[in-house]
Amino acid sequence: MSSTTANRGWARTHGVSRALGRTLAVFVPVFFLGTFITFALRQLSGLSPAHLQLGESATPEKVAQLEAQWGLDEPFLTQYWHWLESLLHGDLGMSWVDGTSISSALVGRAIISLSIAGLALVIGVTVGFALGTLAALWQTTWVDRAITGFTTVISVMPSFVVGIALVAVFAVTLGWFPSAGYVPISQGLTPWFEHIWLPALAISFDTIADVARQLRSGLIGAYRENYVTGAIVRGLGPRRIFFVHVLRNGIGPALTVLGMKFPNLLGGAVVTEAIFGLAGYGKYAADSAQRGDVPAVQGVLVVSIVVVVVFNLLVNTALVRITPASSRGV
């Protein structure tokens, strides 16, 4: 191995370590601040498990007794510390309504929402990258204009409207996919895929549009760089120029936008769950909020914070590993 190759490998490894360190440096304060604000919402809400469980029979004595059982008679910071300790051990607490474990309730429901959001991300990345690459390779032609027009249209289409249209066409009229419900992947890959395809497709349009636009801009900008001109002068083939020089340096904006899109996909999954009759993460959060089950809502918010930050950590790592400019900048 030459010294140049070794230096490049060290720089890339060092770049990844720096990126991980910076992301973790952001994650820790964001996590603690987010959990503190999330926990403070209970105090601001003024809700109590006593009023949910006792109802009209609540007396001051019974309320005080039940709140003492839940530890709500302790100082606020003491309550937060006990809750945070349990949280760090994977315990999100118990539901005020039925006393069930919030962690257990969220696991099964989160799998549904994450399955939809994950498939929507795959659709968005695959179709978006294909459209963005075609638009860049055929820039200023009718292909570029058609793709630009198509992505503009789908970017402004609300996911709930798309979902209703998909159900009407592919579920009701054609009968190709089920209109509602969910089948665990343990019961078969095909039934699982059939039940999440339409809701995932409904929320993928915005990701497709943004990835395509960002990739098109990044690739066109990379084609104008001096290193591409030098590669052409050296006689390198178009395919090698594209994959070795243009794609690696132009993919950065598209990867960056993915870090911002995943939270939107989770939010979109919340909307589509109502349309497709899915008892997922979003429905659990909405039902808990309507019932005043504050610990359950807190659990949903905490899981959301962790999922979003972890996904951004993965995106930043991929960005440093793939794009040379990112590794040089860390």
Image (cartoon, helix red, strand yellow):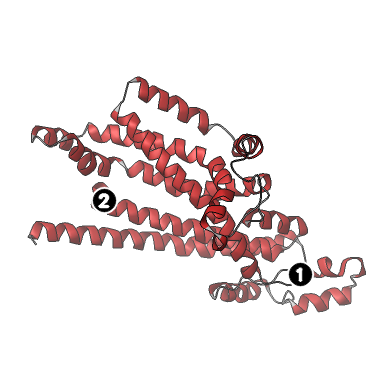
Q: Is residue 27 above or below residue 160?
A: below
Mark closer to the chain start, 2 or 1: 1
Q: Secondary structure at mark 1?
A: loop
Please name whichever residue, 255 or 35, is drawn nearer the observer in this view of the structure: 255
Packing grade of label 2 (10 A; few <14, some 14-19, many >=20) is few
In the picture, measured across the screen, residue 151 lies left or right of residue 295, that is: left
Left or right of residue 210, residue 49 in this image: right
Give the residue displayed 30% in from the left and 26% down from the top.
138
Q: Residues within 10 Å of mark 1 (few under 14, many from 20)?
A: few
Please state the horizontal and vertical placement of residue 141, each as a whole percent of the image.
33, 20
Q: Is residue 259 above or below residue 9?
A: above
Q: Position of residue 164 (x, y in %)?
A: 65, 37
Q: Position of residue 130 (x, y in %)?
A: 37, 37
User: Residue at 33% across / 44% down in the picture?
Assistant: 252
Which structural element holds mark 2?
Answer: helix
Q: Which residue is mark 2?
A: 329
The quarter in which the N terminus is drawn is: bottom left
Label 1 belongs to which residue?
A: 98
Residue 302 x %, y %: 57, 62
Cα–Cα gap, marks 2 and 1: 52 Å
